Every structure is written in C-alpha cells, then in structure tokens.
Image (tube, rainbow, N blue to C red):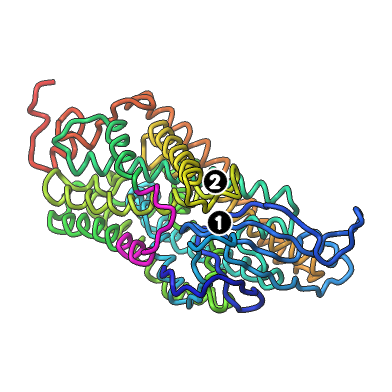
Amino acid sequence: MSAGRSDGGGSQAVEGGTGSNMQPFQTSMYMHTRNIEGGSSANTVSTREVVQRSGMFGKSLIVERESCASINSTLRSNRSYKSNEATISNGFADDKNIAPPQQASWVHIAAIILSEVVGAGVLTLSQKYAQLGWVLSTLAILSFFALLVFISHLMLEVKKVFPAILNMSDAADYTIGRWAYWVAYVLLIILLLFILGDYLLLIGKSLGSAFYSVHLCQPWWVLIGAALVFPFTQLRTLSSTAALCFLSMVTIVGSVAIVIVKLIVNGREPTVETFVIAEDITFTSFMQSLSAIYFTFSGQNIFYEFMAEMKDYRDFMKVFIIAGPFQVGIYMIVGSVGYHYKGTEASGYFLDNLGFGPAYRVASALLFFHMLVGYIIMSNVLSRILHIAVSPYHVNDKGWRGKFEWLGCTSSVLVLSFVVANAIPFFDLLTSLIGGLFLPPLCLLFPVVCYVRMRILTGVKLKWWEWILHVALLSFGVVMMVVSTIATVKTLILNWSTFGEPFSCHCEKVWDTCYCSPQRMEFTGYNCSAIEP
C-alpha cells in the first residue's frame, strides 16, 4: 500500500463515500470522551467523542466523531437517523510521521486483500480434500466464499448507517454496546497472537526445511527465526507496504507452484486412491476440516479497515470481482492437485509432497520470506495495540522512552508468539484451532449480530426468512467453534503423546534421516525399509 504524498497533516471528514487516513488492520482503543456540544450537566449525553487510532504502518490518528451513546439515544426517538460525520486528524501535533488520507480504488483494495488473505492456510488444503473427498471439499470452498461475500454485504450495510465505523470493535460499540466493543477488542488481540504464533512456527519450519542437513530441533529453528525477525520488528513504520504485499503474494504462489510442478513431473502412483466423498468421515472430522478451510477465507475482521481506505467505501463489494476468482481458483488448484497425486496420504503441509533436494530448499526459502513479511506486518499491528494500551501519549515518541517502550512491546509479542509456536508445534492443528475457535466470533458472529442490531435500531424489520438465515449462520458458527475446537484439542493431545510434548525436538519431516522423515526420504530415492531399526 502506497504511503502517498504528505499534505502536512490536517483532518478529513468521513461521510458517505469520502476516504480516511486509516490503514488496513487498524485497531483502536478509547483514549477519552469529551462533551463538545452538550452542557456541563452530569446527565447530559456527550454528543462527540475523541478516540485514538492505531494504524499498522506506524501511524497515530485522533478521531473525533459523534459518540455511540448519543447515537443510540437519538435512534430511540428517530428510527431514520444516520450518524454524523467523523473528523480524523493526523495524530499528535508534533508527529511528522503520519501518512496522508488514503484514496484507494476498489481494484487497489482487491489486490491488498489477495496479498493478505492468500497465505499460509492454502498449504493445508490438499489434506482437507483427503479428509472430505472431492465433492465436500469443493462445496466447502465455494460455500465459504459465498459466505464471505454475504457477510461483507452485511458489514457494508451497517457502515452505511454508521459511517464512522472504522473496525469491528466500532461496529460492536455502535450496534450492541461498550461491553461488546471490549469483547471484540480482546478477541482481536488473542487472534493476532495465535496467528503470529502460526507464522513464527512456519518461519522456523521453513528455515529447518531449507537447511534440512543441519539437524537442529524445531524449537531451535523457531528461536533462530525469532532472532532473524526481531530487528525488523523494531521498524515502527513500514513505508513500502505495497511492494512487501506484492512480494509476499509472489513468494507463496511460487512456493506452491514448485510443489505442483514437481507432483506433475513425478506423476501419480498407481496405488493412490481418491474418493468422491471420504469413506471414514465423521461429523467431528467434518467440522474440524471445515474450520481449516474457513481459515483460508477469514479476513472479515479487517474489512472495515479496508473500507476506510477507499475513495467510496460503497464500492467495496466490487473487490470480489477480482479477488473471488483468484482466491477460489488457487485454493481449488492446490487442494485438488495435491489430492489427485497423493490421495488419502496428502499432507497437511503442502511442501511435504516434495523430497529432499534443490526444489525443496527453494520452496522452503520462498515460504520463509512470505511468512517473514506476514509476521513483520502483523507484529506491527499487535505491538501498536499494546503500546497504545500502556502508553498512549508516547506512541510516536522518537526519543529514548518511545523506543524503549516499543522494544518492550515487540519483545513481548515475540516471546508470546514463540510460546504459542512451540506449545502447538503442529502447523495444520494450529491452523484448525485458529479457524475454529477465534475466527468465527470476529468473522461471522459479530458481523451478523451487528447487522441484526442495526436493523432493530433503525426500525427496519427483518423478514421471516432473514431471521431463519441469520439464526442458521449464528448456529453454524457456534457449532463449528465447539465441535472443531474439541476435535482439534483431542488430536493435539494425541500428537503430543505420539510426536512429543511442547518444546520437544519435533524433527519429523524436516531432518534428512529415515528416523525423522521416512516418507520424504522415500521421495528422494532412499529405501528406509532396508535400514536396520
């Protein structure tokens, strides 16, 4: 995302289709609320409030808007009410490190969505085809994309009524209440922490895979990966975000492309079996597989931030004209190719379909770069949230105090990510846990509830079929959360007992030995069965 030209600060109104300063992945917390238009009486409802905003690229913004309490009070007496504009100022008066208002087109936002959403989750899809079969896997991908579009439509309708909404927490605050704001806020922090753990796990795993002849245990590779990423986390602004996002997308596509080409060249073994519908599927395994596929279609929790980047946020639905075919296409290609050539033995880590050799090293190196960029960007998000929480007035302090506080925030995030990566050292299970436990509340439950509440607040009654649809979506989200999480935790406990507990060596499928990687050694040409145990 381009930083654009500097206009020397100032402010910008957000109303209807006008843009805003907000960067993607923004988070926020309330700094203070003040009464601007009302009197000084304790019983007077404040009509304006001032909130502090945090952008992922090192930006600090002050947002002045109509207070949620004032809007809710007005809605009770005027159901056709629409919230007033918000004014966004460029942070603190002495802060010169602020980007100008963004004026992104829907094409630009579509490109950003592709670079951010098409990521690590795609590596698990061939295994999901193996667990579900051709029909259910394909239907799940198409259905989740349709759900993604529908939920995005609901979010857009809510923003049309409350244009000052700039993230999911805002939507919860305006439509449900302040307690919902904090629930969404805390859930976002936990979600980001687990995603960073997932990223750091893949950074370590891809490093160990690129240097597979160096026999270090996985926790050490993760630690080395953390040491490599740490200097980059000290960058409090990321000016070349467009280039980073583009390179990140190219590297993940290049990594999976190497695997696909290698599978095609090696051909399909005559013993490989595939099924229209998996034979041994159960309801629990079905929901667990769905949670991993749902992970690949997550992103609704940041769509309000994307809308805030646009010249006219009402064009947001157009992004799926570009993002949809690409996203669905690459997911189905990766899943179906891996399943066709490996059948029921398809791995939950797509690169496991390669034997040891130059192709494996290059694919692992490309994946390492992709995950490195992802971690840097996401770490900036979470670190900024923590910095605002503990020291809001020194967020953009260029002196020793600001730098020391930023060091503490980024170090804390890195340590916690390291713990998550080694506590759940199985990539496919960590992905399923995120997709089943943390994503449904922010990407499904909150958007649906906010939309229903908006309709109730504005006096626009829901039709009977809308009630059925929304209740069904909420029920599905809750069921997926409960069932898939229980199944994932059970599998996690089983894997701990089989492959080793947290912080164990976990050399499987990384070291070039028959003990750790018998299947990959077979791919490479070694006959591990001939070796004495």
Q: Is residue 361 above or below residue 462?
A: above
Image-quadrant location for residue 61: bottom right
Q: In this view, does 396 lie to the left or right of 182?
A: left
Q: Which residue is drawn at 57% across and 55% down?
A: 27
- x, y percentage for residue 143? 49, 62
- x, y percentage for residue 209? 21, 41
Q: In this view, does 154 lie to the left or right of 37?
A: left
**Badge 1: how crowded within 10 Å, few (<14), some, or many (20+)?**
many
Q: What amino acid is at disc 2?
A: His
Q: What's the magenta bit mostly, secondary-structure-wise?
A: helix
Q: In this view, does 204 lie above or below 244?
A: above
Q: What amino acid is at disc 1?
A: Ser
Helix, strand or loop at label 1? It is strand
- x, y percentage for residue 342? 24, 49
Q: Answer whether labels 2 and 1 touch (C-beta < 8 Å).
A: yes
Q: Which residue is drawn at 11% across and 49% down?
A: 358
Q: In this view, does 126 lie to the left or right of 308?
A: left
Q: How far apart are marks 2 and 1 (CA)?
A: 9 Å
Q: In this view, does 308 lie above or below 224?
A: below
> Where are the magenta residues, as a range?
232-249
Q: Nearer the viewer, residue 173 or 515?
A: 173
**First in residue order: circle 2 vs circle 1:** 1
Q: Mark 1 points at which residue?
A: 54
Q: Nearer the viewer, residue 461 or 35?
A: 35
Q: Which of 400 and 336 is in front in this view?
A: 400
Q: Is residue 181 visible?
A: yes
